[in-house]
Image: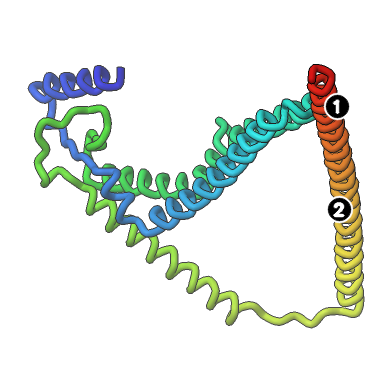
Amino acid sequence: MKKIFLLVVLLFIGVSSWSQRSQIIAYVDMEYILENVPEYIQAQNTLDSKVAKWRKKLDEQARFIEVLKSDLANEKAILTKDLIEEKEEEITLKQEELRRLESLYFGSNGDLFLVRKQLVKPIQDQVYNAIQSIAARKKYDFVFEKSSDLVMLYSNKKYDISDLVLSTIDRTRLSEQKKEQLNKKRNKTNTPKKELTEAQKEAIADKKELIEDSKNKKAAALAKKIAEKEAQQKIIQEKRKERLKQREEARKILRAKQEAAKKKKEEEKKANQKENN
């Protein structure tokens, strides 16, 4: 659909050029531009690092689930029905947790989408703003993107404004840095120091005290929350240990029964052999 639209635009340009002024067209190589913007490379590296970290966590969780499945398959013959159901329930919960993490990281509104929007989108907006500025200044009628769906069978390098976009971005960056430095200097030199009245000093002291009290309350609440969470984790671990202990005892009882049955069978076999002799 996009190709058809662009072809219609080009046909319209060709027809209108006979009756109107010549259309001015330029194009940019977006991939080339972004590869030469340091902020974009840094943002992409940060994003790639986060993605690798998330995928590693998901892979570890998936491997852990496979270990649980393998252990269950190997021990199923000696486990009771309740223990089998408990292990199957644990596997199901881990699988649900894995799916939740996948959605959290790579879902439509997941961390990947939010981090990319936070890191990469401002840089893309910077590039688009530079293109719009150049197009307005140079009076371009159309600016195409080289790697889009439009098939460029031939492109003259003189219509490539990618380097011009990069230089515009650099000038904008330098201008903003100079303005920021100038504003800092002005704030340091021009800000007059005012003498505070006793009432203002007391108000500031009261405000600081309130802030400190708020911080202390937040810290206490956080410490309480952490302690409660640790206590819950400890209870969960104790229950898990107890379940493991019960499983081990059940295995021992089952093995003892199996050995006793085996021993009894052997004794009966020996007794039958003696009678036959």
Look at the image and tell me whether residue 143 can be seen: no
Q: Quadrant of residue 125?
A: top left
| Three-letter residue code for mark 1 | Lys
Image: 258 above or below 38: above
**The residue tagged with tag 1: helix, strand or loop?**
helix
Residue 38, image x, y percentages: 37, 59
User: Which of label 2 and label 1 is nearer to you?
Assistant: 1
Question: At 49% across and 68% down in the image, what residue appears?
Answer: 180
The one nearer the camera, 252 or 232, is 252
| Three-letter residue code for mark 2 | Glu
Residue 240 left/right relative to 161: right
Look at the image and tell me whether residue 145 can be seen: yes
Q: Quadrant of residue 84?
A: top right
Mark 1 burial class by Cα count in 10 Å: few <14, some 14-19, many 20+: few
Residue 136, image x, y percentages: 28, 43
Question: At 79% across and 82% down in the image, what residue appears?
Answer: 195
Disc nearer the start of the sequence (2/1): 2
Image: 211 above or below 140: below
Residue 191 left/right relative to 171: right
The image quadrant where one finds the N terminus is: top left
Residue 199 left/right relative to 40: right
Question: At 29% across and 43% down in the image, what residue appears?
Answer: 30
Image: 270 above or below 180: above
**The residue tagged with tag 2: helix, strand or loop?**
helix
Q: Which residue is mark 2?
A: 230
The one nearer the camera, 138 or 48, is 48
Mark 2 burial class by Cα count in 10 Å: few <14, some 14-19, many 20+: few
Q: Which residue is mark 1?
A: 264
Residue 4, image x, y percentages: 24, 17
